[in-house]
Amino acid sequence: MEMLSGAEMVVRSLQDEGIEHIFGYPGGSVLDIYDAIFQSSDIEHFLVRHEQAAVHMADAYSRTTGKVGTVLVTAGPGATNCITGIATAYMDSIPLVVLSGQVPTNWIGDDAFQETDMIGVSRPVVKHSFLCRTAEEIPIAIKKAFYLASTGRPGPVVVDLPKDVQNPLLKFPYEYPESVELRSYSPTLRGHKGQIKRALAALLGAKKPVLYVGGGAVIANASKQVTELAEKLNLPVTNTLMGLGAFSGTHKQNIGMLGMHGTYEANLTMHNADLIFAVGARFDDRVTNNVEKFCPNAKVMHIDIDPTSISKNIHVDLPIVGSVEVVLQQMLDLIAETQASNDGEKIAQWWKQINEWRAKECLAYQPSNSHIKPQQVIEELYKVTNGDAIIASDVGQHQMFAANYYPFKEPRQWINSGGLGTMGFGLPAAIGCKIARPDKPVCCVTGDGSIQMNIQELSTCMQYNIPIVIVLLNNRSLGMVKQWQKMFYGGRQSHSYMDSVPDFVKLAEAYNHIGIKVDKIEQLQPALERAFELKDRVVFLDVAIDPEEHVYPMQIKFGSMEDMYLSKTEKTDA
Amino acid sequence: MRSIISVLLENESGALSRVVGLFSQRGYNIESLTVSPTNDKTLSRMTITTEVTDLARLEQMMKQLHKLVDVLRVSELTEGAHVERELMLIKVRTLTNEAREEVKRCSDIYRGQIVDITQNLYTIQLSGICSKLDAFITTIEDTSEIVEVVRSGVCGIARGEKALRG
């Protein structure tokens, strides 16, 4: 058998797992592993400027491809800097393996230099974690880590590697396991036949059904099944923020995003439905509004691979545990087998009602001569990219504008931190997307608050020549915070105004990128066109937008799903 | 309502902290927790007693426990016939012969055993359901001074065929 050191085993295990890209930052506790990487040609390593960004890159790499993202960092601050990134991935169920260095095993617990109990610190935000106490444990721990990260409800897994375990001088027999089995872990993929039969009967009998499709449909690659089911039964479909693209944003049956900043038609369809079929969605508080008033007339059916998601926030009448893709396929097979159909007449009635709500055009806005509206920027971005770009968003108003004004045709085209809402996610995420999909245009939509939380990654772009486009919706303030302060805090703008934003054009140029300032509407389209024509450069568009613009619609707190502010002056009459 | 949850989990370092962490992270309360390896040394058996407001919360708690990668089986004991026991060691100070007689008599009535004696101190071992141990404490308090009490927390097992196995 081949003899390898612990450090070599780490790198070989990654190779044998088929890992091509890894994001990281070296340091004392992982120098041996970095030395092994130096001597390997199969893995491409990207050196970041802050460990949090490494995790976001690996995370977005995974969101774009479906593969597991891989991170390598050192002990102590290297490891703790990853926590926000790991928590981001955990909340959105993104498969990651984070390899962290650790002080030598005989120093653990002694408050050694750069010692942190990474297993303990990360515990609430990982799916699982391993501490390797011997080199022989490394291949099996890494195999298990990838297996756990990518199966069931995916999530991040930490593998903590003490320095002595990596010792390059001590060699041990190496064999990478072909597969692993854990007796305490066996996710259910296939749905219960009886439940599927009952669910289908309920779906066919419903007069006002709605498909509520979440991130689970993206993760499970179930777009085909979602679309087929929706088309077969002529169902209205609403995507969650995490589900955007799972059902095409340009499809005529798409009624837009639902929830806090969802469309009027999506929220009213939900509220008035007699049957809600939740597909890989988890009834997040940003969707349901007040759970006591949630969709009073609806029977709720729910497919989820994670049993804890079922009946957690909203009581589910008909649960199906399983992979969204597998369960929907089972359902489609059953429809084909039984030649089942629903009452087209009743569904047409339902659509008539939905189309009346649609006619409200809740996303319409007032263009202005003096200011560029953020909505305009996103609409122009959509036109210039033919709707084909991967959009990596940060967190704030710009995120909601991007979600509502860029109809995503495909899954894995919209990359955002939906669950944790991590500002600073966008730029490193865009880099991860571009590394994963160099063939696609990748655009980071961001704000002047978010971009400054990980702006150092412009340097990573420079080092590896990663040509992304950054569209900064610059309102010189923390827009979403300001919106809430204006709406609910008597307009007191406590610390939400950026008194001194940098000259982003000069900043981009300092990193040898192209910076373009856009402050007039007529500059917008040419600037965007130029940005996407320059395929080998990072282009940073600093777009001055109307600082007074709010995101609408917006659900009214403590209300039902249909209670919404529609503009600064208008709200639903509930 | 009071609930007793039995958990069978991998006997590995970190497994216990994951369970305890889950409870604090999700805002569930633990009244007592006991854990020890089983006849299969690779597995540990844990008994958790907790107060829950409703069945939905209990179900969510059990699902969350089951979701932990280290956890093999989870079962609730109070919904079926079961046996539960808690062990208590209690040390009391008695200064008169009369009081010592009373302690001895009480222990006999409660089927306890006196496991250590010094001139003025008795240590009594008692097992049973929680309310029996509580009652003993109340009784013994009348005649002697309680020096210290240690209770194991509840251990439980289902009656009959039902079993929690790996």
Image (cartoon, rainbow, N blue to C red):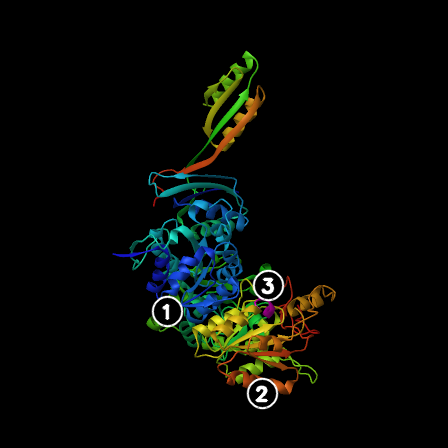
Frontmost residue, A492 versus B124: A492
Chain letter behind tag 3: A
Going by the picture, which residue comes out furthest to the left?
A1
Which mark identifies residue A329? Answer: 1
Residue A483 is situated, as x and y percent measured from the top left of the image, at 67, 69
Q: Amino acid at mark 2?
A: Pro
N-terminal-most mark, 1 or 3: 3
User: 10 Å neighbourhood of mark 1: few (<14), some, or many (≥20)?
Assistant: many
Quarter-of-image position of residue A257: bottom right
Chain letter behind tag 2: A
Task: Determine the secondary structure under disc 1.
Answer: helix
Which residues fall within the magenta stretch?
Answer: A450-454
Task: Determine the secondary structure under disc 3.
Answer: loop
Residue A326 appears left or right of B95: left
Residue A179 is situated, as x and y percent measured from the top left of the image, at 31, 59
Residue A403 is situated, as x and y percent measured from the top left of the image, at 55, 73
Same chain, marks 2 and 1? yes
Chain letter behind tag 1: A
Mark-to-mark CA distance, 3 and 2: 40 Å
Q: Amino acid at mark 3?
A: Asn
